Structures are given as structure tokens and as C-alpha cells.
Amino acid sequence: MSDKASVVAAAALLALPGSMACAQSVSGNVTLTSDYVFRGVTQTDGDPAIQATIDLGQGAFYAGAWASNVDFGDDTDFELDLYAGWAPEWRDTAFDLGVIVYTYPGATDAAGDQDFVELHAGAARSYGPLTLDAGLYWSPDFYLEAGAAHYIDAGASWALTDAIGIDIRAGHSAFDDDSSANYADYQLGVTASRFGLDWDLRWHDSEIDEDRLVLSVGRSFGG
């Protein structure tokens, strides 16, 4: 389950206010990561993943798809997420309202339906090199039919140069039907653009999984 707040277009819109202001755009990226971590929990049993994104933009509206290999210890080995939304800008603040559909093609769903939908809303504002953002995600029936759930997160990023930045994030997952499953997660990352590639070194931690240091390298296109 890709964290759209940080790896897919919804998060990019928050981090880069006005990025969808162009009349029409097609962009995407391909990324190799040492571990696919979603809200503090590995989705590949600590193994590497290859991920790809394609984004379409028309004014303030956007849509796209994101894919990755996964390993849940069963026959689930592929994730495909589809998303769409509206990302207007008002008074120097970027907003993002959208929907994400998480799917796992080919999985048997023996333990319950793995596919689920999330609605999300977020906002971000930049103060020179500093960008602050926050988001809310809500699902009427989360992964494996876990019932209604929501996730809130907030972050701050600092552009040290045009090519290097740092960011810190914190989030909290809550489940209406089982509050004992609630947990928090944290991230601290360094990003860089060098040699035509996008680099990301990130520490993840959560209350339900061990901490992990993840290195990702990707290549973006379009825009």
C-alpha cells in the first residue's frame, strides 16, 4: 500500500505548490528501493521493490497510477493503485482533494478483501525554503475488511539547495473497530537530485514494526 502522502502524485502536489497549474502535463518515474515501507510497515518483507508511476494533469485536476511488487507471505505479489483528485491553490496555500483505489491483482483474498478505497484531503504552504504540510486519509473499509479507518500525517521539508533537501514526517493510523490496533509512525529523510537521478535515504519507524533505513533511486520524466 503506497503512502500517497510521500511517494505518489498527491504528496508531490503538496510538496510543490502550484505544480499542476500548467494546462496539461504527463509525467512519471521509475524507482528502485531497498524496501517498500507503507506507514512504517514493510510491504516486501524487507526486500527490494521496483515501482513505477504515471501522472496526467489538466489544470488543477490530476489522475494517475502507481505499481510495485509486494510480499505479504501469501500469493500477493503485486500492487496497483489508481488515484485522481483536484489540487487548487488559494492564497499561497496548495490544497489536495482526491481518492485512491488500492488493488492487488491476482491475490486470492482468502483472509478477506484486500482491495480498498481511501479519500484524502491535504494542504501545504511554503515559507521560503521551508514547506509545511498535513493530510487526512479515510477509508470506509480498510485492508482485509478491517472496517472504517483513518490516517493523519504532517511533515516539514527544507530545501538546502536546489538539488538537496531534508524532511521529517509523523503519522497516526486509527481503526474504528479495533482501537488496540492504532499506532504511530515516523520518517526522517534526505533527498537529492544528482546524475539525472532522484535519490532518497530515509529512516522509518513505527510502533508495530522495526525501524528501517531505506535507500531509493529513481528516474523521472515529463512534467
Image (cartoon, rainbow, N blue to C red):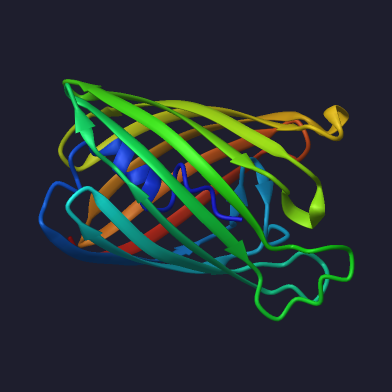
Q: Position of residue 37 (x, y in %)?
A: 61, 50
Image quadrant assignment for residue 204: top right
Q: Position of residue 199 (x, y in %)?
A: 35, 52
Give above or below for 144 relative to 31: above
Q: Residue furthest front?
A: 140
Q: Position of residue 49 (x, y in %)?
A: 56, 67
Could you tell me which residue is drawn at 48 percent across and 48 percent down? 4
Give above or below for 134 relative to 127: below
Q: Is residue 43 visible?
A: yes
**36 left or right of 209 in image:** left
Who is closer to the viewer here, 102 or 7?
A: 102
Q: Position of residue 155 (x, y in %)?
A: 43, 26
Q: Is residue 221 visible?
A: no
Could you tell me which residue is drawn at 46 percent across and 42 percent down? 5
Who is closer to the viewer here, 69 or 190?
A: 69
**93 left or right of 79 in image:** left
Give above or below for 130 relative to 151: above
Could you tell me which residue is drawn at 74 percent across and 53 percent down? 143
